[in-house]
């Protein structure tokens, strides 16, 4: 490892520890990581960087299960099953830690574009696109001004309301590999509209991913639409 790689590893370990600290006291963090609470305090506050070996252990321990547990600790589900996930979609550092775990744990082909629906999917899509080094695109419920050509997808929802998503036509090229993501999937209607957009663009689906599945209906619906991998980090 050269000096820059060491520094990147040490800073990533600090990011992991800061993320874990959000939902823990220092004593609890010491229990989770097996590191002394005093050292953790100095790392989290940025006074000292963890040594390379410690940093490696911290980073390697943050796998899919640990992130799913962290995600569960951050979401609230109300009496009617609606999810408040502002604790995740407003936290770009958390999503930046999720991205490599998703990219390596769900067997998605490397995409050319990460596509989502405005609004709440955008921060997750941005993290994934940044991790892959690819483009990020989001479809909106209204037409962006000054864009001349759009790909549209329209659907009548179970409620009877018609929903249309618009994506600037230049965002996805024919033949692109597109990873469709969102913060949450429930009925799967939104993902279906995004998959319609991919189809209209004559692009390929690299996979479908949601941070949270509220029930299994949405995931099953997406699986019926594509042979590419479909998954969520947690189900509530
Ligand atoms: O699987 P579904 O039943 O389609 O539900 C999932 C969608 O619902 C939420 O978005 P919402 O439409 O509330 O828009 P927002 O992101 O602007 O809040 C969420 O961000 C997903 O896009
Ligand atoms: N926040 C939310 N929780 C559960 N289902 C949803 N459908 C759209 N938004 C939702």
Image (cartoon, rainbow, N blue to C red):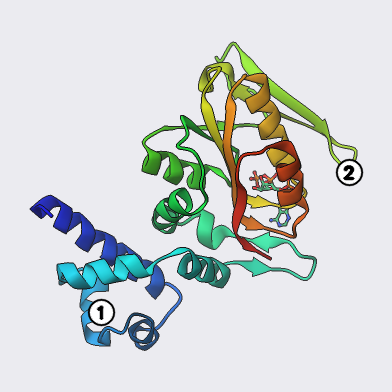
Mark 1 and mark 2 residues within 8 Å of each other at the beta carbon? no
136 relative to 4, above or below? above
Q: Say which element carries label 2.
A: loop
Q: Residue at x 48, y 54 (%)?
A: 105
Give the alpha-carbon distance from disc 1 to disc 2, as whole Å.
Answer: 50 Å
Q: Where is residue 234 shown, x and y percent of the image?
A: 61, 62
Q: Where is residue 122 shown, x and y percent of the image?
A: 53, 42
Q: Say left or right for 203 vs 47.
A: right
Q: Residue furthest right?
A: 160
Q: Say left or right for 131 vs 43.
A: right
Q: Which mark is residue 41?
A: 1
Q: Earlier in the sequence, mark 1 or mark 2?
A: 1
Q: Residue at x 71, y 40 (%)?
A: 190
Badge 1 crowding class, 10 Å Cα cut-off, few under 14, some 14 to 19, many 20 or more, is some
Q: Where is residue 100 shown, x and y percent of the image?
A: 40, 52
Q: Which mark is residue 121?
A: none
70 relative to 137, above or below? below
Q: Quadrant of residue 7?
A: bottom left
Name the residue nearer the viewer: 128 or 23.
128
Badge 2 crowding class, 10 Å Cα cut-off, few under 14, some 14 to 19, many 20 or more, is few
Say which quadrant the C terminus sits in.
Answer: bottom right
Q: Say left or right for 115 vs 92.
A: right
Q: Residue at x 27, y 86 (%)?
A: 37
Q: Residue furthest top?
A: 148
Residue bearing mark 2: 159
42 relative to 115, above or below? below
Say which quadrant the N terminus sits in.
Answer: bottom left
């Amino acid at each position: 490892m050269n000096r820059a790689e060491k520094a990147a590893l040490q800073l990533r370990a600090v990011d992991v520890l800061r993320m874990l600290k959000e939902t823990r006291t220092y004593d609890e963090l010491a229990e989770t990581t097996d590191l002394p609470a005093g050292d953790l305090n100095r790392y989290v506050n940025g006074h000292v960087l963890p040594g390379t070996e410690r940093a490696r252990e911290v980073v390697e321990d943050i796998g899919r299960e640990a992130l799913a547990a962290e995600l569960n600790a951050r979401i609230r589900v109300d009496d009617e099953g609606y999810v408040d996930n502002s604790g995740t979609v407003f936290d770009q550092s958390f999503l930046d830690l999720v991205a490599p775990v998703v990219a390596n744990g769900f067997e998605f082909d490397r995409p050319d574009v990460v596509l989502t629906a405005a609004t709440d999917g955008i921060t997750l899509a941005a993290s994934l696109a940044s991790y892959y080094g690819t483009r990020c695109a989001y479809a909106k419920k209204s037409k962006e001004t000054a864009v001349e050509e759009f790909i549209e997808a329209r659907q009548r929802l179970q409620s009877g309301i018609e929903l249309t998503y618009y994506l600037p036509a230049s965002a996805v090229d024919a033949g692109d590999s597109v990873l469709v993501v969102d913060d949450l999937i429930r009925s799967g209607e939104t993902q279906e509209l995004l998959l319609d957009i991919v189809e209209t663009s004559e692009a390929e689906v690299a996979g479908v991913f949601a941070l949270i599945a509220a029930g299994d209906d949405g995931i099953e619906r997406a699986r019926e639409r594509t042979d590419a991998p479909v998954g969520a980090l947690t189900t509530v």
